Image: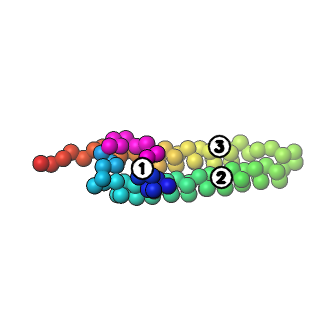
């Protein structure tokens, strides 16, 4: 969808530079790759939450395991911070033009 709208809903730093006609395709391919990996992380997070809930329902009375829940949520947050740092920092830097 981002590619079809030519980056219309794409909110990235230095948007004018990265979405200039000569860089638009490469930038949108990068953003597409970036989002695809984040979707994988989200699926893993929801699978982890599902496991925590299933684990809670095997107990009598049903109770959530706090260490397991903190591990799943903490792991997701750490992956999210790492993901943002890895993919957002390169977009913060605009290469200097050599003339």
Contact, mark 1 vs mark 2 (Cβ under 8 Å): no
Callout 1 crowding tier (Cα within 10 Å): few <14, some 14–19, many ≥20: some
**Disc 2 to disc 3, C-alpha distance:** 14 Å
**Disc number for residue 68:** none
Would you name the residue on which mark 3 appears?
A: 70
**Disc 3 to disc 1, C-alpha distance:** 36 Å
Q: Earlier in the sequence, mark 2 or mark 3?
A: 2
Secondary structure category for the residue under label 1: loop
Q: Is residue 10 magenta?
A: yes
Q: Main secondary structure of the magenta part?
A: loop
Q: Earlier in the sequence, mark 3 or mark 1?
A: 1
Front of the two marks 3 and 1: 1
Secondary structure category for the residue under label 3: helix
**Disc 1 to disc 2, C-alpha distance:** 28 Å
Secondary structure category for the residue under label 2: helix
Would you name the residue on which mark 1 appears?
A: 7
Q: Which span is picked out in magenta?
A: 7-16
Residue 26 is left or right of residue 49, and the answer is left
Which sits in the foreground, 15 or 37? 15
Q: Is residue 58 magenta?
A: no
Residue 6 at what x, y percent from top left? 41, 52
Residue 29 at what x, y percent from top left? 40, 58
Which sits in the foreground, 88 or 7? 7
Residue at the image position 52 percent from the left and 46 percent from the top:
80
Residue 88 is left or right of residue 38, and the answer is left
Would you name the residue on which mark 2 appears?
A: 46
Quarter assignment of residue 94? top left
User: Would residue 5 be visible to someone looking at this image?
Assistant: yes
Residue 12 is left or right of residue 69, and the answer is left
Callout 3 crowding tier (Cα within 10 Å): few <14, some 14–19, many ≥20: few
Furthest residue in direction left, as rendered = 99
């Amino acid at each position: 969808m981002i590619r079809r709208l030519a980056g219309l809903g794409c909110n990235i730093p230095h948007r004018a530079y990265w979405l200039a006609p000569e860089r638009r395709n490469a930038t949108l391919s990068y953003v597409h790759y970036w989002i695809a990996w984040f979707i994988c992380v989200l699926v893993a997070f929801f699978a982890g939450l599902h496991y925590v809930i299933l684990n809670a329902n095997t107990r009598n009375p049903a109770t959530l395991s706090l260490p397991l829940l903190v591990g799943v949520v903490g792991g997701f947050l750490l992956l999210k911070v790492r993901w943002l740092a890895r993919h957002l920092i390169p977009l913060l830097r605009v290469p200097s033009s050599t003339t």
